[in-house]
């Protein structure tokens, strides 16, 4: 079913909603970004109820603040910012668990360790 139309009682033809805020082209990408951010939040902050809730509130709050935006240029800019935030969350955030008074145990996700390159004190020159 088309999310932008609805059926009225006794009618078989959809009635178009008026006052839609995002153009037809922008709507799927905004919705996709919203879903992707929430999926990333669930992976990054897994088993941390406080961080999960704080991230959920922040994502929803940012989308709610900008839901009346109508400028395609501004919408595109906001989508870019959201995509950058998702990339940073996915590639840069590592969970830490307090194990002692001054000790943190880092819990990196498997997808973060894939690109890990070992450090070499004495680099060799390529020939």
Image: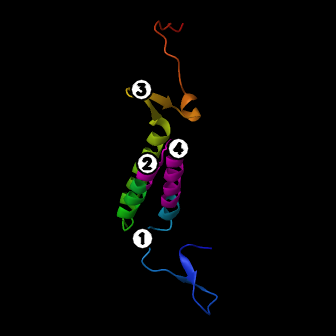
The relative height of residue 14 versus residue 66 in the rendered view (above or below) is below
Residue 126 % position (x, y): 53, 9
Q: Position of residue 30 (x, y in %)?
A: 48, 59
Q: Secondary structure at mark 4?
A: loop
Q: Is residue 72 left or right of residue 33?
A: left
Which residue is at the far front? 101
Q: Disc 3 to disc 2, how far (Cα)?
A: 20 Å
Magenta-highlighted residues:
30-56
Query: Closer to us: mark 3 or mark 1?
Result: 3
**Quadrant occupied by the C terminus:** top right
Provide the secondary structure element on which disc 3 rests.
Answer: strand
Q: Say if residue 102 shows up in the picture.
A: yes
Pointer 4: what residue?
47
**Tags 4 and 1 in contact by the CB under 8 Å rule?**
no
Q: Which residue is mark 1?
A: 21
Residue 12 counted in the magenta span? no
Q: Earlier in the sequence, mark 2 or mark 1?
A: 1
Q: Residues within 10 Å of mark 2 (few under 14, many from 20)?
A: few
Residue drawn 44% across and 74% down? 20
Viewer-closest of 57 and 2:
57
Label 4 crowding class (10 Å Cα cut-off): few <14, some 14-19, many 20+? few
Give residue 50's mark.
2
Cβ–Cβ under 8 Å for marks 4 and 2: no
Task: Classify mark 1: helix, strand or loop.
Answer: loop
């Amino acid at each position: 079913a088309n999310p932008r139309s609805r059926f009225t009682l006794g009618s078989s033809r959809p009635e178009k909603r008026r006052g839609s805020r995002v153009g037809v082209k922008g709507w799927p990408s905004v919705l996709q970004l919203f879903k992707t951010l929430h999926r990333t939040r669930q992976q990054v902050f897994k088993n941390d109820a406080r961080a999960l809730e704080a991230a959920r509130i922040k994502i929803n709050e940012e989308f709610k603040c900008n839901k009346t935006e109508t400028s395609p240029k501004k919408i595109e800019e906001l989508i870019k910012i959201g995509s950058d935030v998702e990339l940073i969350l996915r590639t840069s955030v590592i969970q830490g668990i307090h194990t002692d008074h001054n000790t943190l145990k880092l819990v990196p996700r498997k997808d973060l360790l894939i690109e890990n390159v070992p450090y070499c004190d004495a680099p060799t020159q390529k020939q």
